[in-house]
Image (spheres, rainbow, N blue to C red):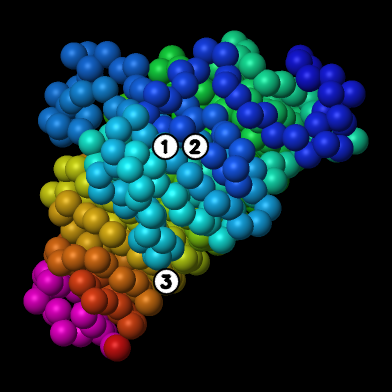
Amino acid sequence: MRLVTPFLLASLAASGLAFAGPVPGLKTSETYQVTANGKAVWTEHLRSTLDIPAMPDWFTKGPHVAVPQDIHITDFEATGPVDIVVELPAPAGKVVLKPLSRGITPTIEGNRFSFQLPGPDKVYIEVEGHAPLALFANKPFPMPGSTPATFAFGPGTHEVGYLTLKDNDSVYLAPGAVVYGGIRASGAKNLRVYGGGILDGGNRFESMVKLEDCENIQFEGITTRNGIGWTNTLIRCRNVSYRGVKVISFGPAGDGIDPLNSSNVEISDSFFRCTDDCIAIKAPDYTVASSNIRIHDNTMVGFAYADGVTIGFELNAPSISNIEVWNCDVILARGGSMVQGHSGFSIICDGPARVHDILFRDIRVEQVEFKLFELQCTYGKHYGDDPPGNIENVTIRNVSWAHEAPIVLQGFSPENRVRQVRFENCTVAGKPLAQMKHLIRKNEFVEGVVISE
């Protein structure tokens, strides 16, 4: 199946052209008209198609998911500074560009607002009275070059169902391509999925990307969205890279990326807007340890029932270790959970694993509904019938939380503890955490907590 000819791919690569839209079958935004460096760029209005009355009761308790969800998306290439002008159908009210760490305040003039991005970036713009605008000024999308992809899709819509990949297969989604379906592989090596296009579940395809026992995997540039359940599921995989991707989910259990018992995983320069955890590291298999996972330079909107990054719940492996999360922005984390609500980021050990040597650093958390951060060893029976585990040697460094909320540290028993937790140069609402110790809620099964400025 090659729906883009090698000649067309070579021509696109040589010209550096990016698809400008509109994309057949997708809805053009009537709210936002966007120009980048004086050139009009197409903006999509993406609305969820969930059958809301058929959703589980627990899911629709949240008012933000009890109605159709809307987001507008502008997606284009950029190689340097970008002057953005956005026009609205009526005078603009309050406009906030996030992540707030970018320090960009749009200029509002009548029914338009403008700002400059210093270079490629993925930002989330909240405009009073309207659904948000996700603006993706991407680094140049990867192109096939002289090597044709195994499966290649040009601009337009494609109904393909599930693609099953084998060793050395690659999938190219050109900018402007919308591929309805999913990706499957088992025991395969050297897989690549890339480009500037969209893999769309159409609220019909479950676990849109599901790879088992695979090795040497690259995902770059594409958008995965609108699937059923977990969006990207990696089961016992090794040497995995997700770079520059965008993940959008609307339904129950809409996790963004889930490495399960996987090792040597890197997730970077990506954007998540999810209705469950944006990134969830899990280990349900009792026999395969998980280690060496790097998560950095990402922006996360935990729209519902979501942490930005969590290790847990299902942690049955012998160990989960050497995990580092850095330079990430958590714009939102909210929704209820089995441990009294979600956090900006967390470790929830609901199983017998030993979770150790974890580093969270240089993270900005803007808004949470329940908790800033948590480390919890549970009784092990939220997602199975397992004994409890342990959490040890966790460092939280240079983390800022924008407002006050609890930090929860909970062991389970004298044998199942949270040990050696270091908070270094962390702040809450602009104040050193060392001055805000009243926010920390810990029980008798927590030891070795150090807070330093």
**Residue 421 belongs to the span the image colors magenta:** no
At x 22%, y 47%, the residue is 334
Coordinates of residue 110 in the picture (x, y in percent): 33, 43
Q: Residues within 10 Å of mark 3 (few under 14, many from 20)?
A: some
Helix, strand or loop at mark 2: strand
Q: Which of the marked residues, 1 or 2, is nearer the chain's N terminus?
A: 2
Q: Is residue 140 above or below residue 145?
A: below
Q: Please, what is the three-letter code of the amino acid marked with disc 3? A: Asp
Q: Please, what is the three-letter code of the amino acid marked with disc 2? A: Val
Span highlighted in magenta in the image = 431-452
Quick check: can you spot residue 393?
no
Coordinates of residue 29 in the picture (x, y in percent): 43, 25
Q: Is residue 161 above or below residue 44?
A: above
**What separation in Å lies between label 3 and label 1 (alpha carbons)?**
34 Å
Q: Residues within 10 Å of mark 1 (few under 14, many from 20)?
A: some
Q: Which of the marked residues, 2 or 3, is nearer the chain's N terminus?
A: 2
Coordinates of residue 276 in the picture (x, y in percent): 32, 39
